[in-house]
Amino acid sequence: MGNAEDGRHEGFSADERAAMKDHAKELKAASRRASKAEKAAEAERELLAKIAEMQDADRVLAERVHAVVTANAPTLEPKLWYGMPSYAIDGKVVCFFQSAEKFKARYATLGFSDLAKLDDGPMWAAGFALTEVTPEVEARIAELVRRAVG
């Protein structure tokens, strides 16, 4: 964020405001839900609906990521986080998919929070650019999410 004196915009961008609004809706929806099983099923439906709304390139990537994550880390709970597909333990996000289109980036991102057990010495990757999900990429995602949940 810049300051008004140098002519740069101050405040949140429209995309950031939209993500915050999505998050507020998610919190409201979560507070209305009943049982844990009902919450989990509804959260996954919402996540899959959000993926279905994505543009083709992002949608294909997100569908593959979802399939790999749920198959290899079944303890992770699908949920929306700031309007993005994410996967959590006890409601706390461990990893997420950020579409390229949502933030006008040239690639989608598979990101991991500090809860992910990916530590590798004093420095390690917590985000990965995704442009295609090949069998090799699927294997790498599977390995990462298995490590992330320990």
Image (tube, helix red, strand yellow):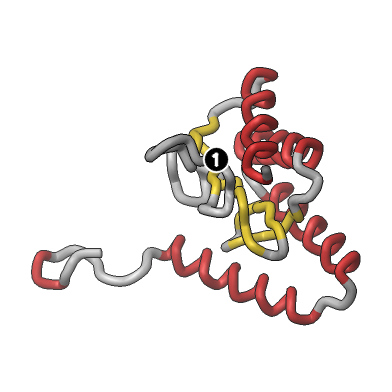
Q: Is residue 49 above or below residue 127?
A: below
Hey, which residue is sitting farthest left in the picture? 5
Label 1 sits on what residue type? Leu
Residue 87 shows in the view: yes
Residue 109 percent coordinates (x, y) = 52, 40
Q: Is residue 11 above or below residue 60?
A: below
Q: Is residue 55 above or below residue 33?
A: above
Foreground of the two, 9 or 30? 30
Q: Is residue 46 above or below residue 101?
A: below
Foreground of the two, 25 or 41? 41
Residue 61 percent coordinates (x, y) = 65, 35
Q: Where, quadrant-wise, is the N terminus in this rendering?
A: bottom left
Instruction: Tell me the residue that label 1 is attached to.
Output: 118
Image point 65% across, 20% down: which residue? Answer: 134
Image point 55% across, 72% down: which residue? Answer: 21
Q: Is residue 19 left or right of residue 68?
A: left
Hey, which residue is sitting farthest front in the picture? 121
Image point 66% across, 52% down: which residue? Answer: 85
Q: Residues within 10 Å of mark 1 (few under 14, many from 20)?
A: many
Residue 90 percent coordinates (x, y) = 72, 64
Image point 57% across, 54% down: which residue? Answer: 115
Q: Where, quadrant-wise, is the C terminus in this rendering?
A: top right
Dot 1: element: loop
